[in-house]
Amino acid sequence: MKLHLFFVIVLFACGQQQPSAQTKPVSHDIFDGLLKKYVDKNGNVNYIGLKKDQKILDSYLTLLSSNEPSASWSKDEQLAYWINAYNAFTISLVVKHYPVASIKEIRPGISFINSVWDIKFIKIGNETYDLNNLEHGIIRKKFDEPRVHFAINCASYSCPALRNEAYTADKLDAQLTDASKSFLADKNKNEFTPDRITISKIFDWFTGDFKKNGSLIDFLNKYAPVKINAKAKIDYKDYLWSLNKQ
């Protein structure tokens, strides 16, 4: 009986110790340093420089892979993690295949995989994901936050600019608001007058995400540099997939 009780106590103690390391939110300092060093104020990336520091980037990806978000993390901690994961793994994919003129040139080499966004190369916890899984299966599905469309970056000219700092829980709301305003103020990607707007195809592709609390115009008027009339004519810009390189 005493021996049995001893093993019960040991097993209980081990069970109590295991979760602490697994549930602690990760630091994004490594990624933050790389972004500050290799991304300019316009969101353009020095991929040649990043290629030289690929081991540092890989160390951050390893950190993400071994620290999947848990229910004990706050919503902002989880969302900051997934935004940074999407951006970091996208960068790593481009760096691995650089030089390329467009991320769309990266081919999976498997006939039944449609695009670069369907390549399963992202290992997090016990799962292997592709970029579509992260964007549509996790970020859009689990977080009711349309501003994420201006935070995740597809390494292309027409994408919202890659921020030259990591997203963090303590600044997330301000960062998402700033990303939204910056994207809408970029005349290469969105043009506004009170009665006519020519906007990114993002607002066409994901229109439902922006209409959950009103019309698309209602959403745009929260962040646009011009007050838009409710009946303004809407056109969409062509989406350019050239690489966001310096």
Image (spheres, rainbow, N blue to C red):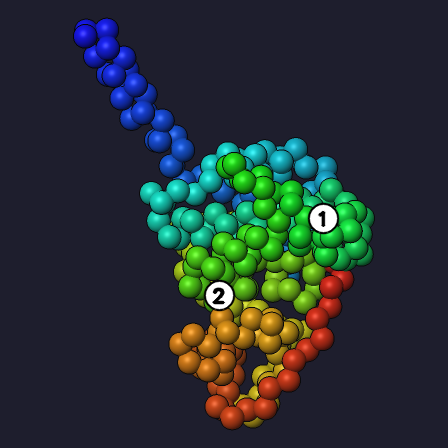
Where does residue 151 sit, x and y in percent of width and height? 54, 60
Q: Between 181 and 150, which is closer to the camera in this rendering?
A: 150
Q: Element under label 1?
A: helix
Amino acid beneath label 1: Val
Q: Could you give the CA–CA distance between mark 2 and mark 1, rounded to whole angstroms?
A: 24 Å
In the image, residue 199 sits, relative to residue 56, either above or below, namely below
Amino acid beneath label 2: Arg
In the image, is 219 to the left or to the right of 236? left
Where does residue 194 sit, x and y in percent of width and height? 54, 90
In the image, residue 162 sits, relative to residue 61, either above or below, namely below
In the image, residue 125 sits, relative to residue 147, either above or below, namely above
Please give the residue where the numbered disc 1 appears in the rendered image.
94
Q: Between 227 and 68, which is closer to the camera in this rendering?
A: 68
Q: Is residue 163 visible?
A: no
Residue name at image x 62 percent, y 38 percent: 57
Image quarter of the C terminus: bottom right
In the rendered image, which quarter is residue 59 located in? top right
Residue name at image x 53 percent, y 49 percent: 84
- Number of residue marks: 2
Where does residue 95 sit, x and y in percent of width and height? 72, 44
Sequence-wise first label, 2 or 1: 1
Please give the residue where the numbered disc 2 appears in the rendered image.
147
Residue name at image x 65 percent, y 58 percent: 154
